Image: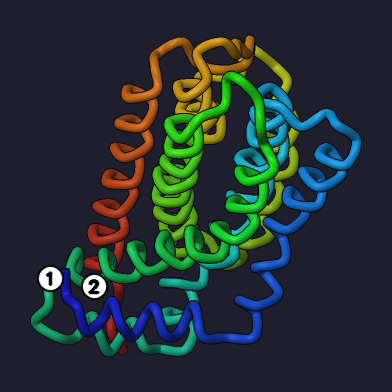
Amino acid sequence: MNRTLFRLAMRRLLLRRRSVLLALAPMLAALVAVVQAAGGTADAQAFSGLMEQLFLPTILPFLALVIGSSAIGEERDDGTILYLASTPLPRLAIALPAIVAAAVTTVVLCLPGLAIVIALSPGDDFSVSAAAWAIAAVVVGACAYAAAFGALSLRVKRPVVIGLIYVLFWEGSIATFAPSARWLSLGAYARAVVAGGLPSFTDYNVPAIGALAAAALLAGVAALATWWCGRRLARVELP
């Protein structure tokens, strides 16, 4: 991976006023965790419900959408991508740093809120292992979402609008509560990773493939979408 392009992408995505505002989104889950702790209802099952019904299907993809779509989309809009495409660099070497930077930025913005949720989730079932699986779910979920939305930004002119419809109506609604949709949802596989850290917790809306298999599938989606971005950039017509 080209480290120079990665550093430039990280600086452009993370060191912006918008990133500060986006970091407030995970605090919504933290606020719910505070209310649960104050009411004495914070336990392992409450933690899983918070992660699987709010954090993973709504907050995480929303952040990845805004960041992932701008990782490549903004370079396309301002013409930077045309300059990069005119260099001898392989197209995948241009797309990969942008997608990785988008995923890392998404994880960084999620971590403060996630840390509060984990810290306020006591219970006999909750452990360091459960916290590790939750963090892993956010990491692999961020990679898959960032790559998918990065690919979307190369395909349509308004990726945020289309992506927001997808996040709200599919991931945040239908795929969260309809068992028949669990096999076609990135968020559902991220939920399966969280469930792997809490053996006593079962959820009817989690694909029955195991946490490791779910994480591998999300990583595969991220790799495939990133590869497609490289292929798509190869078709950019230079002026």
Q: Are marks 2 and 1 in contact (CB under 8 Å)?
A: yes
**Crowd class of label 2 (few under 14; some 14 to 19; many from 20; radius 10 Å):** many
Q: Say how the picture is coloured.
A: rainbow
Q: Nearer the viewer, residue 238 or 220?
A: 220
Residue 160 image-quadrant placement: bottom right
Q: Which residue is mark 1?
A: 90
Query: Does 83 sit above or below residue 205?
Result: below
Residue 187 in the image: above or below residue 114: above
Whether residue 48 is visible, yes or no, is yes
Q: Which residue extends farthest left?
A: 88
Amino acid carrying mark 1 in the image: Pro
> In front: 16, or 91?
16
Cα distance between the residues tagged 2 and 1: 7 Å
**Does 45 sit above or below residue 30?**
above
**Left or right position of 1 against 199:** left
Closest to the observer, 218 or 131: 131
Task: Tell me the element at label 1.
Answer: loop
Q: Residue at x 28, y 84 (%)?
A: 238
Q: Quadrant of residue 80?
A: bottom left
* Residue 94 image label: 2
> Looking at the picture, how far across and down is residue 66, in whole percent?
59, 65
The spot of residue 188 in percent (x, y) is 55, 27
- Tally the marks: 2
Q: Residue at x 30, y 82 (%)?
A: 7
Image quarter hosting the C terminus? bottom left
- Residue shown at the point (64%, 86%) measured from the top left: 17
Above-or-below relation of 96 to 218: below
